[in-house]
Amino acid sequence: MNKQDFFDGRVFDAYRWFGAHMEDQSVVFRTFAPNAAKITVTGAFNDWQEDEMTQDGRSGFWSFEAPKAAPGQFYKYRVYAGDGTVQDHCDPYGFAMELRPGCCSIVTDPDEYRFSDADWMAARTASPDAPLNIYEMHPGSWMRNADDENGWYRYDELADRLIPYLQENGFTHVEFLPLSEHSFDGSWGYQNTGFFAPTARYGSPAQLKMLIDRLHQAGLGAIMDFVPVHFAVDGYGLAKYDGTYLYEYPHPAVGESEWGSYNFIHSRREVRCFLQSAANYWLTEFHFDGLRMDAVSRLIYWQGDPARGVNGDTMDFLKNMNAGLKARHPSALLIAEDSTAFPGVTRPVAESGLGFDYKWDLGWMHDTLEYLQTPPDERPRDHGKLLFSMEYFPNERYLLPLSHDEVVHGKAAIVQKMWGAELDGKYAEARAFYLYMFAHPGKKLNFMGNELGLRTEWNEAAELDWQYAGGPFHTFFAALCQTYRRHPALHADYAPDNFRWAQGGSPAACTYAFERQAEDERLLAVFNFSDEPQLVPLDAPASLLLHTDWERFGGSLKENDKSFIEKKDGYFLKLPKFSAVLLKYDV
């Protein structure tokens, strides 16, 4: 590693230098702590005695060579600060850590696992015309393992269960909540202590690589949540790492986040190298197909507040990181969780954008759910909540999310959010809503359990309620996902002629109709969000692809029933209350 590049913030592979590395017959430990008075390394290889590290001049680069160290051994750094305080720390660049509440780093062999996914990596694409249907999941609460004291499956054990499930249900990618090491289960991985260490909850780095390799060989992509804004306050982590505010802001007004964590100080070039190296590490060493970056609004505006203005340092960091990642991984996906109206989030950095491939459309999520929580007789007044997203959609490349944040902390499960007291009505509305989501331009993301039609919100300490698996709503959702993947018109989202409003829409009647077009197919989606049957005109004959009111989905219509299309002075759809259809125009 070129040290001047590190101080200038240009390094994307600092992990190849820092951390614990096997070199010849020894392990060399390296860390960066410019204000430490002394650092020792202690671990299993020296019977937990202190071996003093050597600083390279006054550079802040400390190292120690341990001939007796070997993969699998635990270690820590003991940092002696200039003010006389002493604190044990895990390795900021450590590649594995022990299970909480332990906090030691672990020496690893990076070659322990060899990938067999060359074909997948060569064919991988970030094309905006490709289908992208993401299953967001928290591995520890998807399914629980009765044979494990914590209830967790290992990464490799998850593969046996997860891969066929994703295939059967029509997903293209799985997105894991942050897998980097964290001490508090309830943070779901968003308060990290080990930015380069896969959490030991589910196994070793080699086992995670095996999971991703197997996903690829099954034709499935893997995305990971990445947290570039803040980190955990645990004393053994990054907090005051060399006795001073090295990674965080020195003032609590900007140094502490709303989540009770510490904010990174992105103006420091060494911190930029740390974060962009971590992002590159997951893409390079683990073959992840993309990163979903958390809390991007905090990288655009001071504390995420537009009223406080754009934060130039964090914006500069973000642009340089994204440009560097896309240069190294052009087929990987960079996805922004961003709730702001800041322009150009998905434009390339070279075109004055932020360099993301996709941006979460949180406005669509909030507006649409609010519309469906409104009593039907008031929906004509609120039709703009359904129409607004179509107006701004061309401005960015959007991804429509129904994420973990929407089904936790008292917000209720998606089905429960629907208006009304009758369960059949809620499920009918939810089916129409999901067809609206998959017919709407933009890529798709759903949190685990949404596909089952759960009635209770997510609890990270328990597994999903699998009694709903294979039920009518689950059957509908799988059919919808498979339909989405089969029809190019539904995922060629950014072609100029891909979307247009069709005749038959009437906000006063809560009916809407629009077309999606690509290649040689032209599809029509029609929705009745009222609590009364509606008659909607068609401008040409069409074949039915999917009806949300089919009996096998929990509705009332038989699939061979053609009476839903009526011909008298033209063609008309007869839509039951809270229903929707997807049709293909006859050629």
Image (cartoon, rainbow, N blue to C red):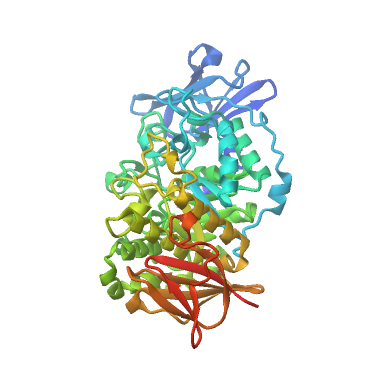
Can residue 281 be seen here? The reply is: no
Q: Which residue is at a point 42% across and 66% down the rendered structure image? A: 579
Q: Position of residue 319 (x, y in %)?
A: 51, 58
For the N terminus, which image quadrant?
Answer: top right
On the rendered image, what quadrant is the C terminus found in?
A: bottom right
**Number of marks drawn:** 0
Question: Residue 196: x percent and y percent?
Answer: 52, 36
Q: Nearer the viewer, residue 566 or 47?
A: 566
Depth check: give the residue in front, 325 or 341.
341
Q: Position of residue 396 (x, y in %)?
A: 49, 68
- 517 w.r.t. 193: above or below: below
Instruction: Describe residue 423's horizontal placement relative to residue 24 as left or right.
Output: left
Name the residue nearer the viewer: 134 or 296. Answer: 134
Q: Is residue 502 above or below residue 543?
A: below
Residue 417 appears in the figure: yes
Q: Is residue 188 left or right of residue 11?
A: left
Q: Give the farthest residue toward the bottom.
A: 569
The residue shown at (38%, 28%) is 81
Question: Residue 485, located in which quarter of the rendered image?
Answer: bottom right
Q: Residue at x 65, y 44 (%)?
A: 216
x%, y% of residue 349? Answer: 54, 63
The image shows residue 266, relative to residue 395, as above or below, that is: above
**In front of the other: 82 or 429:** 429
Left or right of 146 in this view: 406? left
